[in-house]
Each structure stands twice: as C-alpha cells, then as structure tokens.
Image (cartoon, grey):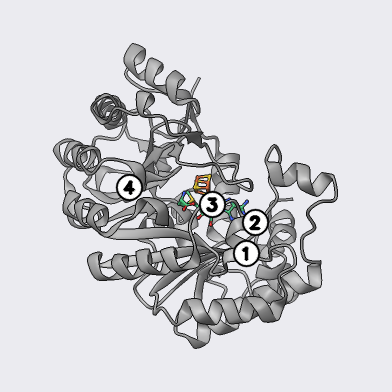
Amino acid sequence: MPTTLPTKLVPTEASLPPLGVYVHWPFCAAICPYCDFNVHLMRNSQTDPADWLVAYRRELAHAQSLRPQGRVETVFFGGGTPSLMSPDLVAGILSAIDEMWGLAGDAEITLEANPMSAPETHLKDLRAAGITRLSLGVQAFDDVALKFLGRTHSAQDARVAFEAAQRLFPRASFDLIYARPNQTPDAWASELSAALDLGPQHMSLYQLTIEPDTPFYKHQASGKLTLPDEDSAADMYEITQSLCASAGLPAYEISNHGADGHACRHNVASWQGGDYLGIGPGAHGRVTSLEKRARLSSVAHRSPTEWLAHVEDQGHGWAEQQALDSESVEMEAVLLGLRLVEGVGLDALAARGIDLDAARLAKLREQGLLSPNTARLQASPEGRLILDHLIGQLLA
Ligand SMILES: C[S@@+](CC[C@H](N)C(=O)[O-])C[C@H]1O[C@@H](n2cnc3c(N)ncnc32)[C@H](O)[C@@H]1O
Ligand code: SF4
C-alpha cells in the first residue's frame, strides 16, 4: 500500500514543486573504465530513432497521467552520451513534452555531450532542435591523462568542441575529473587555470571515484592503480575552491561551479526537492501525485532491451514505483539540501513536513559544522569537507 502524505502536507495545484524531466540515453561510442553509469555500447541495430521516439513518448504519457499539472521548467538529456542522439529524436521528445504539459518559454534544456560526437554541424542541429545548454564531458586537458581515462579525444578536440558550444548555445559547461593517479596539486592547479582561461561560465569538477565492477576497481584491487593520498586530494579540493572563486565561478554545490545566475537550474531544483520525471532506461524520478496524495519515486529497468519491451507491454519501463515514507523524504531532503552551498531554508523543509531536531542542529552549529544561520540548514565550509560525517550526525 502506498504511504500517503498527511492531509496538511498534501500540496495544492498551486503549491506543487516545479516540474523537470530527466531523459536518459543509455548509449556511448566507447565505455570509459571508471564509469558505472547505466551505459551500453551503441549499436545501430538497437538505436533506431523512430523506435526510441515511440517508446519515450509512451513513457512520457504514463508520467503525465501521474503528474499532469504544471508547465515543464527544465529538461535534462543525460547519459550515456546523448550527443549521439539524432536531433530529430531530441526535437520529437521536446515536442511531446510541450504537447503534454507545455514547455516554459524560458525552459532550460540541457544535453550532455562527448567531444567525439560534437562536431559543429551536429551541435547546430541540436541547438535548432531546442537545446539551450550543452554540458561537455572533457575530463582532462592533458592527453596522457585522457588516454589513461580511456577517452578517445584529445585535449585540443575538447577545446574546439567547447568553443563551438560557447558560440552556439546560450549556456555551456564542461566536466573535468581530478585527483587522478600521479596527479600532483601543482599539476592540477595549472590544468584548472588553463581550463579557466577558456572563459567557462559553469564547470562540474569531480574527484575521481573508483566504482565497484569497473575496470579501474580491478586495477586498484591488483595494485595497478593508486589514487593520490588524502592530503593531496584535500589540497586539490582547496585549489579548486580558491581558483574557481577567484575566477568568478564559486562552488554552488560540492562539484559544481558557476558564475552568478549560471547554476544548472534542473539540478538545483532536484536538490531542493523539486519534481522530476525519470524517462528512459535506468532513469530515477520523483513526482508528487495529487491524486495518490504521495511523493512517488520511480526507477526504470536498466537494460535498454528490457526497458523497450516493458514500455511496449505496459506503457512504461518503470521497474519500481513507490510512495516515499516520511523517513525517506527527510533523509533525501537532508542529503540533497546539504550538497548546495546555500543549503535549504528550514521553513521550506517544514512546509514539506520535515522538522529537524533543534538540539541536534544547535550542537552542530556550536561545533562549527553547520553555518550559524538559524533559518537555514547549511553546511559550513568545514562541514562540507566532512559532509558524510555531518549527514550521519544529523540523521542518527
Ligand atoms: C554522462 S557523463 C558526461 C557526458 C559524456 N558521456 C562524456 O563522458 O563525455 C557524466 C560525467 O560524470 C563524470 N564521471 C563519471 N564517472 C566518474 C567517476 N568514476 N569519477 C568521477 N567522475 C565521474 C564525468 O566527468 C562525466 O563527464
Ligand atoms: S563517462 Fe561518459 S562516455 Fe564514458 S562511459 Fe560514462 S557516460 Fe559513457
């Protein structure tokens, strides 16, 4: 039986959270040895755009039956490598969203791209299909590191692709991975400075994590791969914060840096508890259903073939759909809210039925792990360094 929200917490149509759509494209031209996302090698026989458009449309229609209200404010094509999608498929999905809900006039529509599938003509077609924000997976501006990361592009290919993205899209961003084996803090500082010289308004800067069941995991276990020690990794994190802040791109989230007004609206809304529909293989979603008086979580089948078969049979590829209980809602709000540098307002949490223990908050403020602002749940700079510990203390 679904867990329904207490009457006082059921939103009205006017107070529903903003709506976004996450669309997962699960294919890549090559699989990188560090990546544990839901990714599959692209084969033309499996990826006919017309078949995928039918399936995406059906799943969108199912999602619309659960959350029909509101215009869509943000769309995020994530992957995998969505720059391998045909522009017609992207345009078809956007027009389905527009027909079903209406796309806000100023909607943010992001697409993740790999430099190898981002020639200028293709980027132009993606822009014409409606993409307003391109997020490019660069990973490193160092050819030796790119090879180590299993990437098939050079640093120069990435520069050319990013410069084209800057010309063609209202917003452009790139991802880098740092704290790589053998990378020194000095080497990272010069790589990051060179990256900042390209004049980005937004960057996602991730420390390399070794994920189970990846080739890197096996290399680490056999001693072939060693990450920088904790002190070097902490130095690299500090360098990241200070170089980006001096260049006018302070962190607004653990790994995301942007100039004023350039934060990714889609991700910020989801960290603040907004609704997002999860469309496509392996996608996760969160939607408030007025009819079911509940916040629903959905997780789709990960295998593209299985997902397509389920969509054909039952109109959606969701393997799980359940109402979140109040404990999960609270845990998620704390976990996600604390990722944001500005945190979340305690009144906004209270409106969602989340009342955190006041004595515990006061103690963590006293310890300097939470900011002194009593109106917000916000990690202090020291707290952000040990976020897992802080979250553990709050939710214990
Ligand atoms: C979906 S990919 C981006 C687009 C495209 N697939 C590409 O790689 O060019 C999302 C991002 O997650 C980051 N990422 C993936 N696995 C990671 C790991 N193990 N450690 C750190 N960052 C990782 C990479 O920076 C990557 O660009
Ligand atoms: S990092 Fe990007 S290109 Fe590499 S496997 Fe993951 S999703 Fe695919």
Gap in angstroms between the C-alphas marked 1 and 3: 40 Å
Tag 2 and tag 4, C-beta contact below 8 Å = no
Question: Mark 1 and 2 residues: CB-CB less than 8 Å, in contact?
Answer: yes
> In the figure, 273 relative to 268: above or below?
above
Where does the image place residue 361, in percent across and percent down from the top left?
Answer: 67, 65
Q: Which residue is mark 4?
A: 20
Front-most of residues 268 and 56 = 56
Is tag 3's residue or tag 2's residue first in the polypeptide sequence?
2
Tell me the kind of residue under disc 4: Gly
Q: Residue visible at 38% across and 24% down?
A: 46
Image location of residue 238, percent across then percent down: 66, 78
Label pair 4/3, CB-CB below 8 angstroms: no
Left/right of residue 143 with respect to residue 395 in the rendered view: left
**Amino acid of disc 2:** Phe
Q: Which residue is mark 2?
A: 148
Q: Position of residue 159 (x, y in %)?
A: 41, 69
Numbered badge on residue 326: none
- Of tags 2 and 4, the one toward the viewer is 2
Q: Which mark is residue 144?
A: 1
Under tag 2, what secondary structure? helix
Residue 114 seen in the current view: no
| Foreground of the two, 302 or 177 | 177
Q: Which residue lies at the image location 16% right of the left edge and 40% below the top edge?
A: 95
Residue tagged 3? 333
Q: Is residue 85 left or right of residue 351?
A: left
In the rendered structure, the answer to whether residue 309 lies left or right of residue 232 reads left
User: Which mark is in front, 3 or 2?
Assistant: 2
